[in-house]
Image (cartoon, helix red, strand yellow):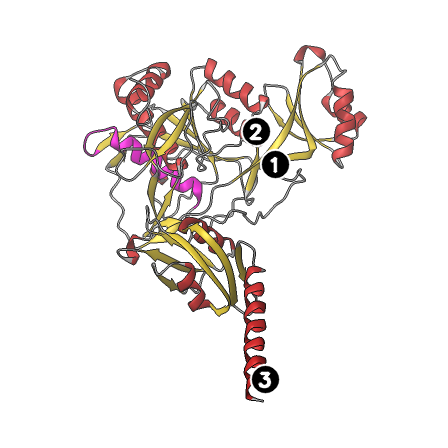
Amino acid sequence: MRLCLLISTLLTTAILGLAEKKAISAVESGIDWQSSDKVSASIENWPLEKVLQSLSDLRKWQVLVEPDLKSSVTTRFRDLPQTDALRRLLNNVNFVIIPSRTGPSRMLVYETASKNAVKRIVPSKRLAKREKPKKEGSGKIDNELIVTIDPKSGVDIEALARQLGAKVSGKIDGLDIYQLEFENAEEADKALAQLEQNDAVTSIDNNFTIQQPEQLSPVNLPAPPLNLRPASADKDGMVVGLIDSSVQRNGSQVSDFLLPEISLAGTSSDQPGQVSHGTSMAETILRGLSASLEGTQETSVRILPVDVYGQSDNTSTFDVARGVQAAIEGGADIVSLSLGSDQPNSLLKSVIQAGSKEGVLFLAAAGNEPTGQPVYPAAQKEVIGVTALNRNGQRVASYANNGNFVEAAAPGVGVTVLNNQTFFGTGTSFSTAYTAGVAAGIGSTQKLSMPQVREAITNNMRPPGTGP
């Protein structure tokens, strides 16, 4: 009897163990976070950054990590409580969760001290406030076409749109470029065939969505002073066009250096407790400008903000092209574009080419994925593609894109002050804005033409390990 009981017990234990093993392996190479906050995982040799990305994508916390923290995680478990699961997932690296009444809690992951956890792990998929129809993965807006009309043809664009079953939802004045919106993708495809046969149409483009970079994180760090004073209003100076989200004037350090904002996307969604990406780029431009000068100086450089996002988390290549044209017409000498797409676009290309012929200098971000593949408009030959340096400035940052199209590199970190709160961010957005500020400083103090400024930037700020 005892032998039968022992065999039965062993068999039951073996079956339960096998069932548990199968249950754990059912979480195939991933993390299963249940609504009850019970967690199961099965991961093998995951870099810590991949684990943190998975945690960030849950949107339970705003995840910040100490830069350059490296680890490899292998673990398997099932139905553990949240705290125990995090200890296993983070491979005994230090972490603390700080609750917040006004937003998501912050998870600080660090090796030395929690105050050093300043690098934001951005969720891989953003929740857009406004969605446009698009094909999965491509970012193409399927129900829109961008059409350029020969001005000598005398075509009535409104009549042509009605004939095609579309409406004119946007235009770029002076360039005879129009945004046509259709009821659905099928109608747009039918119209495309007709437009290709129309001699008055000089080009047809697709429109693509461009995501706005993530918000910056608040940190308990002091920000260095700008060491700049605005020159008198009647003194003409260099203008940097900033194509981005809205720039906040109240409570920021940039208000005295701003020209009136051009809004192409309606009312902005600025909040007093959160710095906008545009505001952080404006302050970063001024920090680059300050770095190119000696000591505290008066400057006549001004920033022309062009908001192409409004209340949305995305914009489009058409709206960016409109923004570039608006900046050029507003007198911009330099245009900073801390945005990009992996899709080349002939519309944006033509607008930038037109501005370049007028002597405007363009800079654009190379992107925050180290693929080596071109990102547009940074990869356009008229544009200086800018990547980010790591903390010591000796090499390109591990997250930053680099390739033959990249011509300049600058610090990939930035601090911004709004209402006495310091915000911190990383990325090639900051590198681009900083370089635009340096370019403005060189051009304004040395009285250089934009081609000369471009030569100075590409000669003296080229990425480590490239060129002579």
Number of the front mark, 3 or 2: 3
Rounded to the nearest angstrom, the CA distance separating label 3 from label 1 is 65 Å
Q: Position of residue 107 (x, y in %)?
A: 40, 59
Question: Is residue 210 positioned above or below 19 on the image?
Answer: above
Number of the front mark, 3 or 1: 3
Q: Position of residue 165 (x, y in %)?
A: 79, 30
Q: Position of residue 220 (x, y in %)?
A: 30, 55
Rounded to the nearest angstrom, the CA distance separating label 3 from label 2 is 70 Å
Q: Earlier in the sequence, mark 3 or mark 2?
A: 3
- The type of residue carrying mark 3 is Cys
- The type of residue carrying mark 2 is Gln
Considering the numbered disc 1 on the image, is that residue within a helix, a strand or a loop?
A: loop
Q: Is residue 292 magenta?
A: yes
Considering the numbered disc 3 on the image, is that residue within a helix, a strand or a loop?
A: helix
The secondary structure that most of the magenta stretch takes on is helix
Which label is found at residue 343? Answer: 2
Q: Position of residue 45 (x, y in %)?
A: 43, 51
Instruction: Say which quarter of the image contains residue 109.
Output: bottom left
Which label is found at residue 139? Answer: 1
User: Left of 53 or right of it: where is 108?
Assistant: left
Considering the numbered disc 2 on the image, is that residue within a helix, a strand or a loop?
A: loop
Q: Earlier in the sequence, mark 3 or mark 1?
A: 3
**Residue at figure coordinates x 63%, y 44% from the top left:** 131
Instruction: Say which quarter of the image contains residue 397.
Output: top left
Q: Earlier in the sequence, mark 2 or mark 1?
A: 1
Question: Is residue 35 positioned above or below 421 on the image?
Answer: below
Image quadrant in which the C terminus is located: top left
